[in-house]
Amino acid sequence: MNPLQLVELLRGHNNYIQTHNYPDPDAVASAFGLQYFLKQHGVHAKICYEGTVEKLSTRKMFEVFQIDVLPADQIRDMTQEDYIVAVDSQKYNANLTDLAGDEVACIDHHPTFIECSYQYRDIRRAGACSTLIAQYFYQTDTPMDPTVAAALAYGIKMDTADFLRGVTELDLDMFAYVYKQADVDKIKVMYHDVLELDDLKAYGAAIDNIYINQGVGFAWIPLDCPDALIAIISDFILSLNVVDISIVYAVRRDGIKFSVRSERKDVDAGKMVANVLKDYGSGGGHQEMAGGFIPKENMDRIDGMHARIEEEFMKQIQLMKQK
């Protein structure tokens, strides 16, 4: 896909770049990079998201990289005629709220689970969505600000877990490309003071409630825990030497949020969580990492919740291993 086609599609319209709900560093960096890319070609767009940004590292990005974002509840004038570019998510996904505007474009590195047509579509495998945005600058020889380059480099590092998860050759090439142009001091600042006291409480709750079954680490968090922190704890559980699949879930006011990781070649995390949750909610993601959600109204359908969740995931893992 030629990114200049996206420029022409958006030209003359009121545009928004929408990240997935409760955005993580890769989503924020992708939106920021795309906003700057469009600006360099004479097209203006605002960055927006639904939910809150509860992770300290993501909030810190707004200050360090000087990123302006709009929570969806502060947008009063969006209409059906306005154009939306979805980044790091796809229309109809559970983690992308349907706002008033028209989702004319999508840029994402996750697999597609619910088909949707866009006027501009760039959905392909990569370790980070920031990688795809970096390639837009590379393909079109568009000048890049050092702050934008630093944000994209940070997004790539975070979503690939420092190049240890889901990394592709394109991720490595684009990281090298943006790093050469980046304000490296800004990247270094992002690695300091990013852990909050409430994060430790969530870690402690997960450790208190961990159970390991045949290399599968289950942990539940009885706290209203944000998505990004659940994902980080899932990575933490996976780092145990007796775990090669981690399934972490938080029982929140709005439902049950899942974060799943897999180091097994025969167990696709995205397909697994999609199959397990299809009758209760929704889920999906990559081979190595995925997420899912069961809304509050469906929680009562899960008798003996913790035992049932373990049973359903273990059943799906055994089915995948047999193929």
Image (cartoon, rainbow, N blue to C red):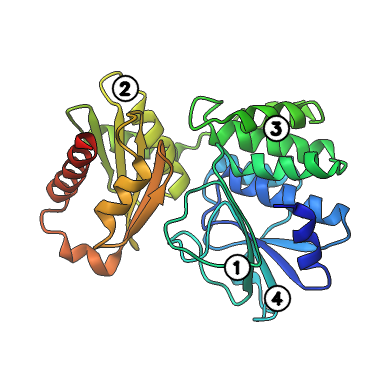
User: What amino acid is labelled 2 in the image?
Assistant: Leu
Q: Give me the disc on residue 240.
A: 2
Q: Which tag is nearer the camera, tag 3 or tag 4?
A: 3
Q: Secondary structure at mark 2?
A: loop
- Residue kind at label 4, given as amino acid type: Asp
Q: Are marks 3 and 4 in contact (CB under 8 Å)?
A: no
In the image, residue 169 above or below residue 30: above
Mark drawn on residue 138: none
Viewer-side label of 1, 3: 3
Q: Residue at x 63, y 74 (%)?
A: 102
Where residue 25 sits: x, y (%)? 59, 43
Q: Earlier in the sequence, mark 3 or mark 2?
A: 3
Residue annotated with mark 3: 174
Give the mark nearest the N terminus, 1 or 2: 1
Which residue was labeled with disc 4?
A: 82
State the separation of the CA atoms marked 2 and 4: 47 Å
- Please state which of the two labelled residues, at mark 3 or mark 2, is closer to the viewer: 3
- What distance separates the C-alpha of mark 1 from that of mark 3? 31 Å
User: Does the image show residue 200?
Assistant: no
Q: Nearer the viewer, residue 64 or 107?
A: 107
Question: Which quadrant is the C terminus positioned in?
Answer: top left
Q: Earlier in the sequence, mark 1 or mark 3?
A: 1
- In the image, is 211 to the left or to the right of 18? left
User: What residue sits right under mark 1 in the picture?
Assistant: 72
Mark 1–mark 2 Cα distance, whole angstroms, equals 38 Å
